[in-house]
Structure formats: C-alpha cells, structure tokens
Amino acid sequence: MTSDKHKVITALELLVKTCEAAKSSISNDPKSTEDPPPLSILHKDLLSLLSLVYGSVTKLALALKPPSPTHSACLVPLKELSDRIAAISHCINMFNASIHGATLVKEVNMVALDVVESMRTLASLYVEIEKFGERSRFGDEYLMRTGAVHSIIEIARSEDGLPNDNLTAVRRHWSKDTGGLEDGIRELGEMIEDARSEIGTSEDGWDELGIEPSKPLADQELEVAEKALIVLRLCSLLHQKVISDILSTPDSLLNTFLDGLAALSPALVSSSDELISTLDSPQDMDCVKTELLVLKGVIDGIQNHLSNLNNQTDSLTDLLRESSLNEVSVSTNCNPREKWFNGCFDQIAKAIQSVPEAANGHY
C-alpha cells in the first residue's frame, strides 16, 4: 500500500467518525440558552457550508475516480470535508428553538442530518473501495452516493429549500397538507357520485383479482356521506384561509403561536382521512361519530389557537368582500378577521352536527 493511499484511508475513516460525531451532536445537543447570532447570519453560514461541502465532494469524486485514483489529490478535499461537517454541526447547534422557532429548527436539523448521513455513507463506501481494492465490484455506486449528497444540498439551496424563518417553515407544513385534504374530498365526492349514478364497484375489476368490492352506498348512507362532504369542504376552506391570511401575513407572529399551529394541519388531514374511512358501506355510525368528535377536537384546537390573533390588524377585508361563502354568518361586534373565522367555525360545527342527524331513524 502506498503512503498516499494509506493517508487517504486514514482520512476517510476520520471523516466517517466526524460524521458520526456530528449526527450525535445535532440529534442530542441541547440548544444553547445564550444569545445566538441573528437568524439571517446562521442561515447564510449554513448555506455557505453546504456549498463548500458540495464542492469538496465533487473534488473527491474526481480524485478517486476509477480505474486510476489520484490519492495525493484526495487529502485536501478530505480535510475540508471533515472540517466542514464539524462546522455544520456547530452552526446547527447555534439555532435555538425558543428564539428561532421549533418548527424551523426541526427543518434545519433534518437537512443537516440528511447531508451528514449521506456524507458518512459515501465516505464509508470509499473506505471499502480503498481497503479492498476491488473497484469493479462497486461499479458506479460511488457516483450514485456522490449524487445523493449533491441532491440534498441542491434542494436545501433552492428557493423552496431551507426555510428563511419559522413562519416560512410553518406555512410550508400547511401548504404541503393542502393536497391531502383535496384528495380526501375528491375521493369522497367520487364515492357519492357513484352512489348517485347507481354505479357499484362490482364492475371495476377488483373481484377478478380476488378482492371483494365495496358495496354501493344505500340511500341513508349516501345522505350521511353528503353531509360529511360538506364538513370536509368547510375544513378545507378554513385550512386555505389560515394559509392565505394568517401564514402569509407580514404581521409579526410569536414562534410559540406558529409552532402550536404547525401540528394542527397534519392533525386535520389525519382526522379527515379517518372520517372518510368510516363512510364506506356498510357504515357504522358509532365509528362515524367517533371520528367526527376527533375532527371537531382538531377544529376546536385551531379555533382556540387563532383566538389569540383577534386583536391583530385586519387583513381579511378584501377577502370577505370577494368571498362566495354567502352562507357563513358573522357577528357585527368583531373585526373582519374574527368575523370570518368565527362564521366558518360556526358553520363547521353545524355541519358536523348534521352528519349523525342525517342517520337518525335509520340506524
């Protein structure tokens, strides 16, 4: 073994250990209670470190390119990678959840852990290749793993990558869940349309695969499903307005408020999906009622959370003027933001109540 090759293996093993230490530090290090640097500085520093890692990984891949690696050219990028992975860990641990927001810190940690783990995997592969020398056995795997590091960093550096602040992080959480709510509404709507058209699922081919087709909705089950669809449409409308009005506002929102709101969107999607799952025939109204209560609990949580914003500057005046939701009743003793949301919450509560009422006398 040449001296340079031995040095490369030692440097690669050090890089693996550095990645393992960084992962442990990011995952377990309690965030400092001291005043951290401004968020804009931390954000800029982290992106700069990721760009440097990207460049060093590229240089390493070129230097170790088979069949004739240039070991002497590997030592500098390997030293750079060890230093920069350690620097990423240090930078991440200066983010403070109580100051910068727990949702943002979670997102930043996930990006950093992905980069560090992909780097550890790549370095471990290089150790195997250099120790055993069977380059043909590994083929282009080093290129795929190099590409994995590049891909994670490219996504983090993109416009939709690393969030700039906690508000952006929470808004993205809610925006990602929009599709899930819409999918559920579309699924239930199709179920209702099939029942209205008296189109069962026995002709959809599932029975040919040995899968028992679901039964078409009976008349009373159809009425329950239609009422539930109204509930879900109102919930989706509420979800959209939280994104467009609350989470897209230039107003300064407390991180405690934002972090509490972050958990409510996936809870809304989950409870909506569970409700939909109870509406297939034959319906069990006890199950339907249980999931309605869970959904109502989530809606109540959103309502209680938004009640903290009632005194903030109104940004819904234009929205209310253009709204087509004429059935939403509002109080004249509230500001426009509060009027709209109170009206929507009131309609959701009434819609939820109407679902079991549709089944009265049938079950």
Image (cartoon, rainbow, N blue to C red):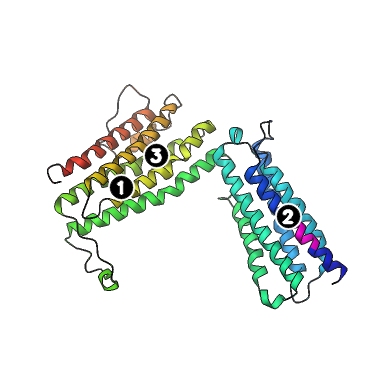
Residue lying at 24% horizontally and 35% vertically, measured from the top left:
350
Span of residues in magenta: 10-15
Judging by the rendered image, the residue that carries numbered circle 3 is 241
Judging by the rendered image, the residue that carries numbered circle 1 is 275
**Mark 2: amino acid:** Lys
- Label placed on residue 17: 2
Callout 3: few (<14), some (14-19), or many (20+) C-alpha neighbours within 10 Å?
A: some
Prevailing secondary structure class for the magenta stretch in the rendered image: helix
SS assignment at label 1? helix
Gap in angstroms between the C-alphas marked 1 and 3: 22 Å
- Corner quadrant of residue 5: bottom right
SS assignment at label 3? helix
SS assignment at label 2? helix
Tell me: residue 234, above or below residue 57: above
Q: Is residue 312 left or right of residue 77?
A: left
Callout 1: few (<14), some (14-19), or many (20+) C-alpha neighbours within 10 Å?
A: many
How many numbered circles does the render carry? 3
**Mark 1: amino acid:** Leu
Q: 353 and 174: which one is in front?
A: 353
